[in-house]
Image: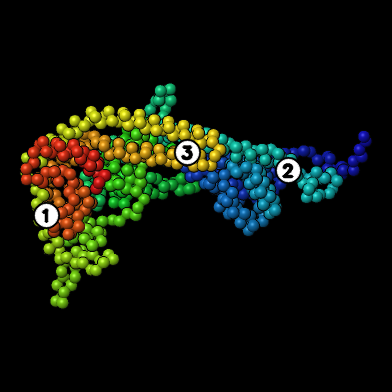
Amino acid sequence: MLMILPPFPMNTLAQPMTAPFLQTSRPLIDATLQVRVSDTKASDYGDSWEMQEQLGRLWAPQNGFRIVKVFYEPYTGKAWNRPVMEELLAFLRKNPNVKTHIIPRVDRFTRAGSDFYLEFKRRLDAMGVELRDVQGTIQPKVNLLAHTGFEYDWAVVSPSRGSEVAKAEAARDEVVQFHVKTINKEIYLANCGYSVRPAPLGLMNQKVLDASGKKKSITVPHPEEGKWLSAIFTWCAEGMLSDQEICDRVNAMGFRTRKKVLRHKLTREVLKMVGGKELTPKMMRKMIANPRYCNVIDEKWTRGVAIYGQGKGLVSIETFNRANQGKVAIRIDDDGKPQVVTDRSPYTANVDNPAFPYRFVVRCPQCGKGFRGSFSRGKLGKRYPGYHCSSKHPYLRIAQREFHRTVETFCASLKLTAKSADLFEAVALEVWERNEGRAEQNREQHITTLQEWRDQQKAIAEQLVMTTSPVAKRLLEEKIDEIEKTITSAKQTQSQEVVTRPELERYLKEIKTIMEDPLKALVEPTNQRFLKRIWGIVFTEFPTYENLTGGTPKLSLAFELCRGSKVSKKRLVAQLCRKWNTFAREVKGELR
Protein backbone atom coordinates (compact mmCIF):
# COMPACT_ATOMS: atom_id res chain seq x y z
CA MET A 1 0.00 0.00 0.00
CA LEU A 2 1.34 3.39 -0.95
CA MET A 3 1.43 5.92 1.89
CA ILE A 4 1.68 9.65 1.18
CA LEU A 5 3.52 11.48 3.95
CA PRO A 6 3.21 15.23 4.47
CA PRO A 7 6.24 17.33 3.56
CA PHE A 8 8.87 18.10 6.20
CA PRO A 9 10.92 21.27 6.40
CA MET A 10 14.27 20.69 4.76
CA ASN A 11 16.16 22.40 7.57
CA THR A 12 14.76 19.87 10.03
CA LEU A 13 15.99 16.90 8.03
CA ALA A 14 19.37 18.45 7.47
CA GLN A 15 20.12 18.86 11.21
CA PRO A 16 22.54 16.25 12.59
CA MET A 17 21.29 13.84 15.30
CA THR A 18 23.20 14.78 18.47
CA ALA A 19 22.98 13.18 21.91
CA PRO A 20 21.65 15.37 24.71
CA PHE A 21 24.96 15.36 26.55
CA LEU A 22 26.69 16.77 23.46
CA GLN A 23 24.38 19.79 23.30
CA THR A 24 26.42 21.88 25.66
CA SER A 25 24.91 25.13 24.46
CA ARG A 26 21.39 24.22 25.56
CA PRO A 27 20.44 25.61 29.05
CA LEU A 28 20.10 23.05 31.80
CA ILE A 29 16.63 22.18 33.13
CA ASP A 30 16.03 22.51 36.90
CA ALA A 31 15.42 19.14 38.54
CA THR A 32 15.13 17.51 41.95
CA LEU A 33 16.87 14.34 43.07
CA GLN A 34 15.45 11.78 45.51
CA VAL A 35 17.60 9.14 47.24
CA ARG A 36 16.16 6.52 49.61
CA VAL A 37 17.30 3.85 52.02
CA SER A 38 15.03 1.54 54.01
CA ASP A 39 16.17 2.98 57.35
CA THR A 40 19.04 4.95 58.80
CA LYS A 41 21.07 1.83 59.52
CA ALA A 42 20.84 0.70 55.89
CA SER A 43 22.60 3.86 54.81
CA ASP A 44 25.78 2.54 56.43
CA TYR A 45 25.90 -0.46 54.11
CA GLY A 46 25.29 -1.29 50.45
CA ASP A 47 23.36 1.26 48.36
CA SER A 48 23.95 4.29 50.60
CA TRP A 49 22.69 7.86 50.25
CA GLU A 50 26.13 9.05 49.22
CA MET A 51 26.43 6.54 46.37
CA GLN A 52 22.94 7.29 45.04
CA GLU A 53 23.50 11.06 45.22
CA GLN A 54 26.86 10.81 43.47
CA LEU A 55 25.35 8.85 40.58
CA GLY A 56 22.49 11.34 40.29
CA ARG A 57 24.78 14.38 40.27
CA LEU A 58 27.00 12.82 37.57
CA TRP A 59 24.06 11.79 35.37
CA ALA A 60 22.06 15.03 35.59
CA PRO A 61 24.34 17.51 33.72
CA GLN A 62 25.20 14.93 31.09
CA ASN A 63 21.50 14.68 30.24
CA GLY A 64 20.64 18.38 30.42
CA PHE A 65 19.51 18.77 34.03
CA ARG A 66 20.66 20.88 36.99
CA ILE A 67 19.84 19.54 40.45
CA VAL A 68 18.43 22.28 42.66
CA LYS A 69 17.46 20.17 45.66
CA VAL A 70 18.12 16.67 46.98
CA PHE A 71 15.50 14.81 49.05
CA TYR A 72 16.88 12.25 51.49
CA GLU A 73 14.38 9.58 52.55
CA PRO A 74 15.15 7.08 55.36
CA TYR A 75 11.84 5.24 54.93
CA THR A 76 10.55 1.92 53.68
CA GLY A 77 9.52 1.83 50.05
CA LYS A 78 6.59 -0.50 50.82
CA ALA A 79 4.49 2.29 52.37
CA TRP A 80 2.11 4.55 50.46
CA ASN A 81 2.08 7.40 53.00
CA ARG A 82 5.66 8.62 52.97
CA PRO A 83 6.46 12.05 54.49
CA VAL A 84 9.18 12.86 51.95
CA MET A 85 6.74 12.39 49.06
CA GLU A 86 4.43 15.08 50.45
CA GLU A 87 7.45 17.32 51.09
CA LEU A 88 8.52 16.83 47.46
CA LEU A 89 5.09 17.74 46.07
CA ALA A 90 4.95 20.85 48.26
CA PHE A 91 8.37 21.93 46.96
CA LEU A 92 7.32 21.40 43.34
CA ARG A 93 4.19 23.53 43.84
CA LYS A 94 6.30 26.42 45.16
CA ASN A 95 8.92 26.01 42.41
CA PRO A 96 7.12 25.66 39.05
CA ASN A 97 10.43 26.10 37.22
CA VAL A 98 11.39 22.53 38.28
CA LYS A 99 10.23 20.25 35.49
CA THR A 100 12.01 16.96 36.24
CA HIS A 101 12.30 14.66 39.23
CA ILE A 102 15.26 12.25 39.14
CA ILE A 103 15.52 8.92 40.97
CA PRO A 104 18.43 6.43 40.99
CA ARG A 105 16.22 3.57 39.78
CA VAL A 106 12.65 2.32 40.09
CA ASP A 107 13.21 -0.02 43.05
CA ARG A 108 14.79 2.85 45.01
CA PHE A 109 11.70 4.94 44.31
CA THR A 110 9.10 2.39 45.47
CA ARG A 111 8.65 -1.17 46.69
CA ALA A 112 4.86 -0.92 46.75
CA GLY A 113 4.32 -2.17 43.21
CA SER A 114 2.98 -0.64 40.02
CA ASP A 115 -0.16 0.79 41.66
CA PHE A 116 1.83 3.24 43.78
CA TYR A 117 4.32 3.94 41.00
CA LEU A 118 1.69 4.88 38.40
CA GLU A 119 -0.36 6.90 40.90
CA PHE A 120 2.58 9.03 42.00
CA LYS A 121 3.81 9.43 38.46
CA ARG A 122 0.32 10.67 37.52
CA ARG A 123 0.49 13.27 40.32
CA LEU A 124 3.83 14.46 38.96
CA ASP A 125 2.43 14.63 35.41
CA ALA A 126 -0.47 16.78 36.63
CA MET A 127 2.10 19.29 37.90
CA GLY A 128 4.03 19.19 34.64
CA VAL A 129 6.97 17.32 36.18
CA GLU A 130 8.64 14.45 34.35
CA LEU A 131 10.02 11.43 36.21
CA ARG A 132 13.44 10.14 35.09
CA ASP A 133 15.86 7.55 36.45
CA VAL A 134 19.64 7.28 36.31
CA GLN A 135 19.53 3.72 35.01
CA GLY A 136 17.68 4.81 31.86
CA THR A 137 14.58 2.66 32.32
CA ILE A 138 12.21 5.65 32.23
CA GLN A 139 12.24 7.28 28.80
CA PRO A 140 10.85 10.75 27.92
CA LYS A 141 7.31 10.87 26.62
CA VAL A 142 6.80 11.13 22.88
CA ASN A 143 3.96 12.46 20.75
CA LEU A 144 2.87 9.79 18.31
CA LEU A 145 1.30 12.49 16.11
CA ALA A 146 4.37 14.75 16.08
CA HIS A 147 4.92 14.18 12.35
CA THR A 148 1.44 15.63 11.68
CA GLY A 149 1.99 18.76 13.72
CA PHE A 150 -0.87 17.86 16.09
CA GLU A 151 -0.85 16.80 19.74
CA TYR A 152 -3.52 15.09 21.88
CA ASP A 153 -3.32 13.90 25.48
CA TRP A 154 -3.96 10.31 24.45
CA ALA A 155 -1.25 10.49 21.79
CA VAL A 156 1.48 11.54 24.25
CA VAL A 157 2.75 8.28 25.74
CA SER A 158 5.79 6.88 27.49
CA PRO A 159 7.56 4.30 25.31
CA SER A 160 9.00 2.65 28.43
CA ARG A 161 5.72 2.27 30.37
CA GLY A 162 5.79 -1.53 30.18
CA SER A 163 9.35 -1.69 31.42
CA GLU A 164 8.62 0.74 34.25
CA VAL A 165 5.59 -1.25 35.44
CA ALA A 166 7.57 -4.47 35.23
CA LYS A 167 10.39 -2.94 37.31
CA ALA A 168 7.93 -1.70 39.96
CA GLU A 169 6.24 -5.09 40.20
CA ALA A 170 9.60 -6.86 40.35
CA ALA A 171 10.68 -4.56 43.19
CA ARG A 172 7.58 -5.47 45.21
CA ASP A 173 7.93 -9.19 44.48
CA GLU A 174 11.58 -9.06 45.53
CA VAL A 175 10.64 -7.61 48.93
CA VAL A 176 7.80 -10.11 49.40
CA GLN A 177 10.02 -13.07 48.57
CA PHE A 178 12.78 -11.78 50.84
CA HIS A 179 10.39 -11.38 53.78
CA VAL A 180 8.77 -14.75 53.16
CA LYS A 181 12.15 -16.46 53.11
CA THR A 182 13.43 -14.61 56.19
CA ILE A 183 10.29 -14.95 58.33
CA ASN A 184 9.83 -18.60 57.36
CA LYS A 185 13.41 -19.33 58.44
CA GLU A 186 12.99 -17.42 61.71
CA ILE A 187 9.75 -19.26 62.56
CA TYR A 188 11.42 -22.61 61.92
CA LEU A 189 14.49 -21.76 64.01
CA ALA A 190 12.43 -20.30 66.88
CA ASN A 191 10.29 -23.44 67.09
CA CYS A 192 13.47 -25.52 67.17
CA GLY A 193 14.64 -23.54 70.21
CA TYR A 194 17.24 -21.35 68.50
CA SER A 195 17.60 -17.61 69.06
CA VAL A 196 16.30 -15.33 66.31
CA ARG A 197 16.24 -12.03 68.23
CA PRO A 198 18.71 -9.95 70.23
CA ALA A 199 19.42 -11.51 73.62
CA PRO A 200 18.08 -9.68 76.70
CA LEU A 201 20.40 -8.09 79.24
CA GLY A 202 22.38 -10.78 81.03
CA LEU A 203 22.36 -13.16 78.05
CA MET A 204 24.15 -13.22 74.70
CA ASN A 205 23.69 -14.99 71.37
CA GLN A 206 26.41 -17.46 70.41
CA LYS A 207 26.93 -19.18 67.06
CA VAL A 208 27.12 -22.99 67.15
CA LEU A 209 27.15 -25.74 64.54
CA ASP A 210 24.13 -28.03 64.41
CA ALA A 211 24.17 -31.72 63.43
CA SER A 212 24.26 -30.82 59.73
CA GLY A 213 27.18 -28.42 60.17
CA LYS A 214 25.11 -25.23 59.75
CA LYS A 215 25.57 -22.24 62.03
CA LYS A 216 22.72 -21.48 64.42
CA SER A 217 22.37 -18.98 67.29
CA ILE A 218 21.77 -20.10 70.85
CA THR A 219 21.42 -18.02 74.03
CA VAL A 220 24.04 -18.35 76.76
CA PRO A 221 24.81 -16.32 79.91
CA HIS A 222 26.80 -13.13 79.37
CA PRO A 223 30.13 -13.26 81.26
CA GLU A 224 29.64 -9.87 82.92
CA GLU A 225 25.94 -9.02 82.71
CA GLY A 226 25.00 -12.54 83.80
CA LYS A 227 26.38 -11.89 87.29
CA TRP A 228 24.02 -8.97 87.76
CA LEU A 229 20.94 -10.91 86.68
CA SER A 230 21.88 -13.98 88.74
CA ALA A 231 22.12 -11.78 91.84
CA ILE A 232 18.76 -10.16 91.05
CA PHE A 233 17.00 -13.53 90.72
CA THR A 234 18.65 -14.90 93.87
CA TRP A 235 17.69 -11.96 96.06
CA CYS A 236 14.17 -11.75 94.62
CA ALA A 237 13.67 -15.48 95.24
CA GLU A 238 14.88 -15.21 98.84
CA GLY A 239 12.47 -12.35 99.48
CA MET A 240 14.52 -10.89 102.32
CA LEU A 241 15.20 -7.54 100.61
CA SER A 242 12.88 -4.92 99.21
CA ASP A 243 12.99 -4.15 95.49
CA GLN A 244 14.83 -0.90 96.12
CA GLU A 245 17.42 -2.61 98.32
CA ILE A 246 18.06 -5.17 95.58
CA CYS A 247 18.46 -2.40 93.00
CA ASP A 248 20.93 -0.56 95.22
CA ARG A 249 23.06 -3.67 95.69
CA VAL A 250 23.08 -4.58 91.99
CA ASN A 251 23.91 -1.01 90.97
CA ALA A 252 26.83 -1.14 93.40
CA MET A 253 28.03 -4.23 91.49
CA GLY A 254 28.30 -2.05 88.37
CA PHE A 255 24.91 -2.69 86.74
CA ARG A 256 24.17 -0.47 83.75
CA THR A 257 21.84 -1.00 80.81
CA ARG A 258 23.39 -1.53 77.40
CA LYS A 259 24.53 1.57 75.55
CA LYS A 260 23.28 2.46 72.10
CA VAL A 261 24.59 4.97 69.57
CA LEU A 262 22.17 7.54 68.12
CA ARG A 263 23.24 8.88 64.73
CA HIS A 264 22.08 11.72 62.51
CA LYS A 265 19.60 10.44 59.94
CA LEU A 266 21.38 12.03 57.01
CA THR A 267 25.04 12.37 57.88
CA ARG A 268 25.17 9.31 60.19
CA GLU A 269 27.23 11.44 62.54
CA VAL A 270 27.20 10.20 66.15
CA LEU A 271 24.87 12.48 68.11
CA LYS A 272 24.88 10.88 71.54
CA MET A 273 24.96 7.65 73.49
CA VAL A 274 21.78 6.39 75.18
CA GLY A 275 21.45 3.71 77.83
CA GLY A 276 23.93 3.10 80.62
CA LYS A 277 21.17 3.61 83.20
CA GLU A 278 21.02 2.18 86.70
CA LEU A 279 18.50 -0.47 87.72
CA THR A 280 15.10 0.63 89.04
CA PRO A 281 12.40 -1.52 90.73
CA LYS A 282 10.06 -1.16 87.76
CA MET A 283 12.81 -2.13 85.32
CA MET A 284 13.81 -5.07 87.51
CA ARG A 285 10.29 -6.53 87.70
CA LYS A 286 9.92 -6.29 83.94
CA MET A 287 13.27 -7.97 83.34
CA ILE A 288 12.82 -10.96 85.64
CA ALA A 289 9.42 -11.75 84.10
CA ASN A 290 11.17 -12.79 80.86
CA PRO A 291 11.16 -16.63 80.65
CA ARG A 292 14.28 -16.52 78.45
CA TYR A 293 16.32 -16.32 81.66
CA CYS A 294 15.31 -19.90 82.57
CA ASN A 295 15.85 -21.09 78.96
CA VAL A 296 12.14 -21.08 78.02
CA ILE A 297 11.08 -19.43 74.76
CA ASP A 298 7.58 -17.97 74.55
CA GLU A 299 7.27 -15.50 71.70
CA LYS A 300 5.25 -14.60 68.61
CA TRP A 301 6.95 -17.13 66.33
CA THR A 302 6.07 -20.02 68.69
CA ARG A 303 2.39 -18.97 68.54
CA GLY A 304 2.12 -18.65 72.30
CA VAL A 305 3.41 -22.19 72.93
CA ALA A 306 6.38 -22.27 75.31
CA ILE A 307 9.35 -24.47 74.38
CA TYR A 308 12.80 -25.11 75.81
CA GLY A 309 15.64 -23.19 74.18
CA GLN A 310 18.72 -24.82 72.68
CA GLY A 311 21.04 -22.69 74.78
CA LYS A 312 21.65 -22.41 78.49
CA GLY A 313 19.49 -20.50 80.94
CA LEU A 314 20.73 -18.13 83.59
CA VAL A 315 18.58 -19.51 86.45
CA SER A 316 16.50 -22.60 87.17
CA ILE A 317 12.74 -22.69 86.64
CA GLU A 318 12.23 -23.00 90.41
CA THR A 319 14.24 -19.81 91.07
CA PHE A 320 12.39 -18.03 88.26
CA ASN A 321 9.00 -18.90 89.77
CA ARG A 322 9.99 -17.87 93.29
CA ALA A 323 11.47 -14.58 92.09
CA ASN A 324 8.29 -13.61 90.22
CA GLN A 325 5.99 -14.37 93.18
CA GLY A 326 3.31 -15.98 91.03
CA LYS A 327 2.88 -13.04 88.65
CA VAL A 328 4.63 -15.13 85.99
CA ALA A 329 5.29 -18.84 86.48
CA ILE A 330 6.61 -21.78 84.47
CA ARG A 331 4.59 -24.98 84.85
CA ILE A 332 5.70 -28.37 83.51
CA ASP A 333 2.92 -30.60 82.11
CA ASP A 334 2.83 -34.39 82.09
CA ASP A 335 4.67 -34.52 78.77
CA GLY A 336 7.54 -32.50 80.25
CA LYS A 337 6.69 -29.40 78.21
CA PRO A 338 6.82 -25.95 79.83
CA GLN A 339 3.85 -23.61 80.09
CA VAL A 340 4.05 -19.90 80.90
CA VAL A 341 1.25 -18.93 83.27
CA THR A 342 0.58 -15.23 83.90
CA ASP A 343 -1.51 -13.83 86.73
CA ARG A 344 -3.75 -11.21 85.09
CA SER A 345 -5.18 -9.90 88.37
CA PRO A 346 -4.39 -6.26 89.23
CA TYR A 347 -1.14 -5.86 91.13
CA THR A 348 -1.33 -3.92 94.38
CA ALA A 349 2.00 -2.78 95.70
CA ASN A 350 2.57 -3.48 99.40
CA VAL A 351 4.16 -0.33 100.73
CA ASP A 352 6.52 -1.03 103.62
CA ASN A 353 5.57 0.87 106.77
CA PRO A 354 7.66 0.00 109.86
CA ALA A 355 4.96 1.37 112.16
CA PHE A 356 2.35 -1.15 110.93
CA PRO A 357 4.19 -4.25 109.70
CA TYR A 358 1.29 -6.72 110.16
CA ARG A 359 -1.29 -5.00 107.96
CA PHE A 360 -1.12 -7.66 105.27
CA VAL A 361 -0.58 -10.81 107.34
CA VAL A 362 -3.22 -10.39 110.06
CA ARG A 363 -6.82 -10.18 108.81
CA CYS A 364 -9.84 -8.37 110.16
CA PRO A 365 -12.10 -10.81 112.13
CA GLN A 366 -15.26 -9.26 110.63
CA CYS A 367 -14.52 -9.05 106.89
CA GLY A 368 -11.39 -11.18 106.55
CA LYS A 369 -9.44 -8.43 104.77
CA GLY A 370 -6.13 -6.91 105.80
CA PHE A 371 -5.97 -4.08 108.29
CA ARG A 372 -4.97 -0.50 107.62
CA GLY A 373 -2.66 1.53 109.81
CA SER A 374 -2.85 5.19 110.72
CA PHE A 375 -2.18 7.74 113.47
CA SER A 376 -5.14 9.44 115.10
CA ARG A 377 -4.62 12.79 116.78
CA GLY A 378 -5.88 13.42 120.31
CA LYS A 379 -7.23 16.65 121.81
CA LEU A 380 -3.77 17.66 123.00
CA GLY A 381 -2.24 16.94 119.58
CA LYS A 382 -0.65 13.67 120.57
CA ARG A 383 -0.63 10.98 117.87
CA TYR A 384 -1.96 7.50 118.65
CA PRO A 385 -1.03 4.70 116.20
CA GLY A 386 -3.48 1.89 115.53
CA TYR A 387 -4.73 -0.77 113.10
CA HIS A 388 -8.24 -0.25 111.78
CA CYS A 389 -10.77 -1.62 109.30
CA SER A 390 -14.24 -0.52 108.19
CA SER A 391 -14.86 -2.55 105.03
CA LYS A 392 -18.67 -2.95 104.95
CA HIS A 393 -18.90 -3.29 108.74
CA PRO A 394 -18.74 -1.05 111.83
CA TYR A 395 -15.42 0.69 112.35
CA LEU A 396 -12.89 -1.48 114.19
CA ARG A 397 -9.73 -0.01 115.64
CA ILE A 398 -7.04 -1.71 117.73
CA ALA A 399 -4.22 0.18 119.36
CA GLN A 400 -0.82 -0.52 117.88
CA ARG A 401 0.71 -1.53 121.23
CA GLU A 402 -2.06 -4.04 121.96
CA PHE A 403 -1.99 -5.41 118.41
CA HIS A 404 1.79 -5.96 118.46
CA ARG A 405 1.69 -7.55 121.93
CA THR A 406 -0.93 -10.07 120.74
CA VAL A 407 1.12 -10.99 117.67
CA GLU A 408 4.36 -11.33 119.62
CA THR A 409 2.77 -13.42 122.37
CA PHE A 410 1.40 -15.95 119.92
CA CYS A 411 4.59 -16.10 117.85
CA ALA A 412 6.66 -16.75 120.98
CA SER A 413 4.41 -19.71 121.81
CA LEU A 414 5.43 -21.39 118.54
CA LYS A 415 9.03 -21.89 119.65
CA LEU A 416 10.06 -25.55 119.66
CA THR A 417 13.11 -27.36 120.92
CA ALA A 418 16.04 -28.01 118.61
CA LYS A 419 15.34 -31.72 119.09
CA SER A 420 11.82 -31.37 117.70
CA ALA A 421 13.03 -29.44 114.66
CA ASP A 422 15.77 -32.00 113.90
CA LEU A 423 13.31 -34.85 114.41
CA PHE A 424 10.78 -33.43 111.96
CA GLU A 425 13.50 -32.87 109.35
CA ALA A 426 14.69 -36.47 109.64
CA VAL A 427 11.11 -37.83 109.52
CA ALA A 428 10.21 -35.76 106.46
CA LEU A 429 13.24 -37.03 104.53
CA GLU A 430 12.53 -40.60 105.59
CA VAL A 431 8.89 -40.44 104.47
CA TRP A 432 9.91 -38.80 101.19
CA GLU A 433 12.40 -41.61 100.43
CA ARG A 434 9.78 -44.21 101.37
CA ASN A 435 7.20 -42.64 99.06
CA GLU A 436 9.58 -41.91 96.19
CA GLY A 437 9.67 -45.52 94.91
CA ARG A 438 5.90 -45.79 95.05
CA ALA A 439 5.55 -42.33 93.48
CA GLU A 440 7.64 -43.40 90.49
CA GLN A 441 5.37 -46.40 89.93
CA ASN A 442 2.34 -44.15 90.31
CA ARG A 443 3.70 -41.74 87.71
CA GLU A 444 4.20 -44.53 85.20
CA GLN A 445 0.72 -45.86 85.89
CA HIS A 446 -0.63 -42.33 85.68
CA ILE A 447 0.85 -41.81 82.20
CA THR A 448 -0.62 -45.14 81.04
CA THR A 449 -4.06 -44.25 82.43
CA LEU A 450 -4.02 -40.84 80.78
CA GLN A 451 -3.19 -42.41 77.42
CA GLU A 452 -6.07 -44.88 77.83
CA TRP A 453 -8.47 -42.00 78.50
CA ARG A 454 -7.12 -40.13 75.47
CA ASP A 455 -7.66 -43.21 73.28
CA GLN A 456 -11.19 -43.51 74.65
CA GLN A 457 -11.82 -39.86 73.83
CA LYS A 458 -10.54 -40.39 70.29
CA ALA A 459 -12.82 -43.39 69.75
CA ILE A 460 -15.85 -41.45 70.97
CA ALA A 461 -14.93 -38.53 68.70
CA GLU A 462 -14.88 -40.89 65.70
CA GLN A 463 -18.36 -42.13 66.65
CA LEU A 464 -19.51 -38.53 66.96
CA VAL A 465 -18.43 -37.78 63.39
CA MET A 466 -20.27 -40.78 61.99
CA THR A 467 -23.56 -40.46 63.89
CA THR A 468 -26.46 -38.36 62.57
CA SER A 469 -28.77 -38.51 65.57
CA PRO A 470 -28.87 -35.22 67.54
CA VAL A 471 -29.54 -37.09 70.79
CA ALA A 472 -26.61 -39.44 70.25
CA LYS A 473 -24.34 -36.50 69.39
CA ARG A 474 -25.28 -34.71 72.61
CA LEU A 475 -24.62 -37.82 74.72
CA LEU A 476 -21.26 -38.42 73.04
CA GLU A 477 -20.22 -34.77 73.53
CA GLU A 478 -21.12 -34.98 77.22
CA LYS A 479 -19.03 -38.16 77.50
CA ILE A 480 -16.03 -36.41 75.89
CA ASP A 481 -16.38 -33.46 78.30
CA GLU A 482 -16.62 -35.82 81.27
CA ILE A 483 -13.42 -37.64 80.27
CA GLU A 484 -11.66 -34.29 79.77
CA LYS A 485 -12.61 -33.18 83.29
CA THR A 486 -11.30 -36.49 84.66
CA ILE A 487 -7.99 -36.05 82.83
CA THR A 488 -7.60 -32.46 84.11
CA SER A 489 -8.34 -33.52 87.69
CA ALA A 490 -5.86 -36.40 87.46
CA LYS A 491 -3.15 -34.07 86.13
CA GLN A 492 -3.66 -31.64 89.01
CA THR A 493 -3.58 -34.44 91.59
CA GLN A 494 -0.41 -35.90 90.12
CA SER A 495 1.37 -32.53 90.02
CA GLN A 496 0.52 -31.93 93.68
CA GLU A 497 2.12 -35.19 94.77
CA VAL A 498 5.48 -34.64 93.03
CA VAL A 499 8.10 -33.09 95.32
CA THR A 500 11.77 -33.03 94.36
CA ARG A 501 14.57 -33.55 96.87
CA PRO A 502 15.95 -29.96 96.48
CA GLU A 503 12.46 -28.52 97.03
CA LEU A 504 12.01 -30.57 100.21
CA GLU A 505 15.46 -29.72 101.62
CA ARG A 506 14.95 -26.00 100.97
CA TYR A 507 11.55 -26.07 102.70
CA LEU A 508 12.86 -28.02 105.70
CA LYS A 509 15.71 -25.55 106.10
CA GLU A 510 13.24 -22.66 106.24
CA ILE A 511 10.97 -24.54 108.67
CA LYS A 512 13.87 -25.37 110.98
CA THR A 513 15.04 -21.74 111.06
CA ILE A 514 11.56 -20.53 111.98
CA MET A 515 11.04 -23.25 114.62
CA GLU A 516 14.26 -22.32 116.41
CA ASP A 517 13.28 -18.65 116.80
CA PRO A 518 9.74 -17.91 115.50
CA LEU A 519 9.65 -14.52 117.25
CA LYS A 520 12.62 -13.31 115.21
CA ALA A 521 11.34 -14.79 111.95
CA LEU A 522 7.71 -13.64 112.24
CA VAL A 523 8.03 -10.33 114.07
CA GLU A 524 11.29 -8.61 113.23
CA PRO A 525 11.14 -8.28 109.39
CA THR A 526 9.64 -5.03 108.15
CA ASN A 527 9.88 -5.99 104.46
CA GLN A 528 6.26 -6.80 103.61
CA ARG A 529 7.12 -9.28 100.86
CA PHE A 530 9.48 -11.28 103.06
CA LEU A 531 7.07 -11.11 106.01
CA LYS A 532 4.19 -12.47 103.91
CA ARG A 533 6.32 -15.36 102.68
CA ILE A 534 7.42 -16.36 106.20
CA TRP A 535 3.87 -16.16 107.54
CA GLY A 536 2.73 -18.17 104.51
CA ILE A 537 5.09 -20.97 105.60
CA VAL A 538 3.86 -21.04 109.22
CA PHE A 539 0.11 -20.65 108.53
CA THR A 540 -2.05 -22.38 105.93
CA GLU A 541 -3.97 -19.10 105.67
CA PHE A 542 -3.28 -15.70 107.19
CA PRO A 543 -4.89 -15.61 110.64
CA THR A 544 -7.44 -13.10 111.87
CA TYR A 545 -6.75 -11.00 114.96
CA GLU A 546 -9.36 -13.07 116.77
CA ASN A 547 -7.49 -16.29 115.87
CA LEU A 548 -4.30 -14.91 117.40
CA THR A 549 -5.96 -13.79 120.62
CA GLY A 550 -7.69 -17.16 120.96
CA GLY A 551 -4.67 -19.19 119.87
CA THR A 552 -6.64 -20.92 117.07
CA PRO A 553 -4.99 -20.00 113.74
CA LYS A 554 -4.60 -22.70 111.09
CA LEU A 555 -0.96 -23.75 111.19
CA SER A 556 0.96 -25.53 108.48
CA LEU A 557 1.41 -29.28 108.91
CA ALA A 558 4.97 -29.07 110.27
CA PHE A 559 4.03 -26.74 113.14
CA GLU A 560 0.76 -28.54 113.77
CA LEU A 561 2.48 -31.91 114.22
CA CYS A 562 5.42 -30.61 116.29
CA ARG A 563 3.48 -28.47 118.79
CA GLY A 564 2.40 -31.44 120.87
CA SER A 565 3.86 -31.94 124.32
CA LYS A 566 5.23 -35.36 123.39
CA VAL A 567 6.52 -35.60 119.86
CA SER A 568 7.65 -39.12 118.96
CA LYS A 569 9.15 -40.32 115.72
CA LYS A 570 6.56 -43.05 115.30
CA ARG A 571 3.70 -40.58 115.67
CA LEU A 572 5.27 -38.11 113.28
CA VAL A 573 5.89 -40.76 110.63
CA ALA A 574 2.33 -42.04 110.80
CA GLN A 575 0.69 -38.63 110.60
CA LEU A 576 3.02 -37.32 107.91
CA CYS A 577 2.38 -40.40 105.75
CA ARG A 578 -1.37 -39.91 106.15
CA LYS A 579 -1.22 -36.21 105.21
CA TRP A 580 1.66 -36.34 102.73
CA ASN A 581 -0.33 -34.80 99.83
CA THR A 582 -1.16 -31.76 101.95
CA PHE A 583 2.45 -31.49 103.05
CA ALA A 584 3.62 -31.77 99.43
CA ARG A 585 1.42 -28.84 98.42
CA GLU A 586 2.83 -26.79 101.30
CA VAL A 587 6.38 -27.58 100.17
CA LYS A 588 5.55 -26.44 96.64
CA GLY A 589 3.94 -23.28 98.01
CA GLU A 590 0.48 -24.03 96.58
CA LEU A 591 -1.32 -23.40 99.87
CA ARG A 592 0.31 -20.04 100.56
Secondary structure under badge 2? loop
**Where's residue 214, x and y in %?**
43, 25
Sequence order check: which comes first, mark 3 or mark 1? 1
**Where's residue 388, x and y in %?**
21, 65
Which circle marks residue 476 in the picture?
3
Q: Amino acid at mark 2?
A: Ser
**Residue in the foreground of this view, choosing between 58 and 105:** 105
Foreground label between 3 and 2:
3
**Residue in the foreground of this view, choosing between 474 and 416:** 474
User: Which residue is identified by label 2?
Assistant: 158
Residue at 55% across, 52% down: 83
* Pointer 3 local density, CA inside 10 Å: few below 14, some 14–19, many at least 20: some
Let me know if residue 73 appears in the view.
Answer: yes
**Where's residue 252, x and y in %?**
22, 47
Q: How is the image coloured?
A: rainbow
**Where's residue 73, x and y in %?**
54, 47
Residue at 37% across, 48% down: 274
* Pointer 1 local density, CA inside 10 Å: few below 14, some 14–19, many at least 20: some
